[in-house]
Each structure stands twice: as C-alpha cells, then as structure tokens.
Image: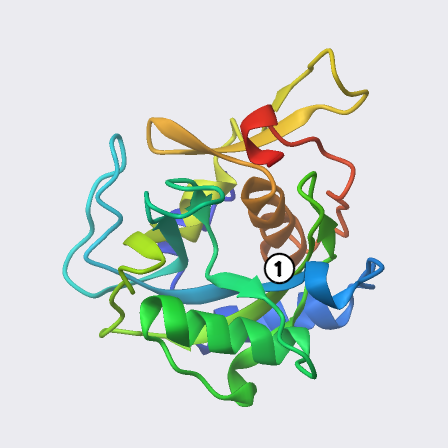
C-alpha cells in the first residue's frame, strides 16, 4: 500500500493528481457496436459512513477520505444478479460514453453530475458476455444524498481508495480455460471479480500510482461470462 494511502483525502489535490495522470495516459479503445456498447462511472467521492463490509471498518460520519462508489446489483436482474458493479449500463443511440455513464449513475444511485465532473477515461474492456465497457472517471465530491434505485441496485458502497492499494491486490488465479489469469481485487475479507475488478485495478495503477498499466487481457470468472 502507498505510504499516503491512509491519508488520501477527497480534495482538490487528489483531483488534480488524477487529472494529471489521465492526461498523460493513452487510452486503448475497443471496437463498439451500439447494441454491445456500455459505459460505467468510476466515481470518486467521500468515504462517508463507510462501506459496511466484512473486514472493512466503518469511518466517521461523512469522512473526507477518498472512496469509490460501487453497487451490488439487484437479485432479480436477469444478468449478473447480485454481483459487484460500477454504476453504468448500455449506451443509448447518439450518446457518448461520458453521457451514458452520467445518465446511468443518475438512474442507479440518484447522483446527478454535469459534464464538468468528467476527468477522463480508462481503457475499454471487452467482456466475455460480449460488451465493450468504457470506464469514465468522474469527480462526485461529497455526494451525501445518493440512494439505490431498487429496480437495478440492491445496495451502494463507498469503498475507500486505500482499500484498492493493498499489497495483496490484485489476486491472480491461473485457470485451465484461458492462457490469462483471472483477476480479482480484495475488499475487506472478500473480493470483487473482473471485469469490475480489472477496471478498479487500472484506476489504481493509472489514476493513483501514475503507471500506464493495461488490464484488457485479464480473464473473468466463469460466472461472469453470461
């Protein structure tokens, strides 16, 4: 973990650092077909009340420690029910990835941001289920009033960025069905699987550490293929 991880604050200095690193990063874009194009918001916010996850302690109310907004998908959804996710979904006709990410975030967690909140993009990630996901990094600030849309989201979690800087991250597992390792990111006493984990790892490497790390080659667990 970086020496400053425990002191990482959601402030103008962090925003400037992330913008600097994204400006220097050359994004790799996948081949998008509209019906398979999606965008997700990698939203930086305050840790607030904490994530409430096993093995991950809660923080003081509306802590200013920097965190990312993640969700658990609703259990009744036809695809990827109950899985960890970043706010996002399919791109509508005529939308840019930035517009789609902001729209989906407003729909899923009731967080409405304008275009000025967008800091940049990470690499497109092509999933086993056939989607080309574009991660859009956005600055969400305190975001004190977010709440889940029960039609899509079971719960919202503000996970401190420091958690993604752990020395045991990422977790890589060799599997028989692929030449590439499955990537997971540990959180508390559990873990998050790719593709979400791959995006989180690239956010850590590019936006925080300033390393131009690629993740598109990493494998996903079989349960995430459908």
In the image, taking residue 209 as reference, residue 104 lies left or right, namely left
In the image, taking residue 102 as reference, residue 153 lies left or right, namely left
Q: Position of residue 5 (x, y in %)?
A: 44, 48
- Residue 115 occupies quadrant: bottom right
Residue 167 in view in this figure: yes
Q: Which residue is drawn at 33% across and 46% down?
A: 76
**Relative depth, front residue between 86 and 129:** 129
Q: Which quadrant is the C terminus positioned in? A: top right
| 114 up-or-down from 67: above or below | below
For the image shown, how many numbered marks are present on the structure? Answer: 1
Q: Which residue is drawn at 33% across and 49% down?
A: 74
Residue behind mark 1: 207
Q: Where is residue 79 in the image (x, y as percent from the top left)?
A: 49, 44
Q: Describe the colour scheme in one phrase.
A: rainbow
Secondary structure beneath label 1: helix
Q: Where is residue 130 in the image (x, y as percent from the top left)?
A: 71, 47
Q: Where is residue 223 in the image (x, y as percent from the top left)?
A: 54, 28
Q: Which residue is drawn at 66% across and 81% down?
A: 95
In the image, taking residue 61 as reference, residue 122 lies left or right, namely right
- Residue 64 occupies quadrant: bottom left
Residue 10 in view in this figure: no
Badge 1 crowding class, 10 Å Cα cut-off, few under 14, some 14 to 19, many 20 or more, is many
| 74 up-or-down from 102: above or below | above
- Residue 169 occupies quadrant: top right
**Relative depth, front residue between 29 and 43:** 29
């Amino acid at each position: 973990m970086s020496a400053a991880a425990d002191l990482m604050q959601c402030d103008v200095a962090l925003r400037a650092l992330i913008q600097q690193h994204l400006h220097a990063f050359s994004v790799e874009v996948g081949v998008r077909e509209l019906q398979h194009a999606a965008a997700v918001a990698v939203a930086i916010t305050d840790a607030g009340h904490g994530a409430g996850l096993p093995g991950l302690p809660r923080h003081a109310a509306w802590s200013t420690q920097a965190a990312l907004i993640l969700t658990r998908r609703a259990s009744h959804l036809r695809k990827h029910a109950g899985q960890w996710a970043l706010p996002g979904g399919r791109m509508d006709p005529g939308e840019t990835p930035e517009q789609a990410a902001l729209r989906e975030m407003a729909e899923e967690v009731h967080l409405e941001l304008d275009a000025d909140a967008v800091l940049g993009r990470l690499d497109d990630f092509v999933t086993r289920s056939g989607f080309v996901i574009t991660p859009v990094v956005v600055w969400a600030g305190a975001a004190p009033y977010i709440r889940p849309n029960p039609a899509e989201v079971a719960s919202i979690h503000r996970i401190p960025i420091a958690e993604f800087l752990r020395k045991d991250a990422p977790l890589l597992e060799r599997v028989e069905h692929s030449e590439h390792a499955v990537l997971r990111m540990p959180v508390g006493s559990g873990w998050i699987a790719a593709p979400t984990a791959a995006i989180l790892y690239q956010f850590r490497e590019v936006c925080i550490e300033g390393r131009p790390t690629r993740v598109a080659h990493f494998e996903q667990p079989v349960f995430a293929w459908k």
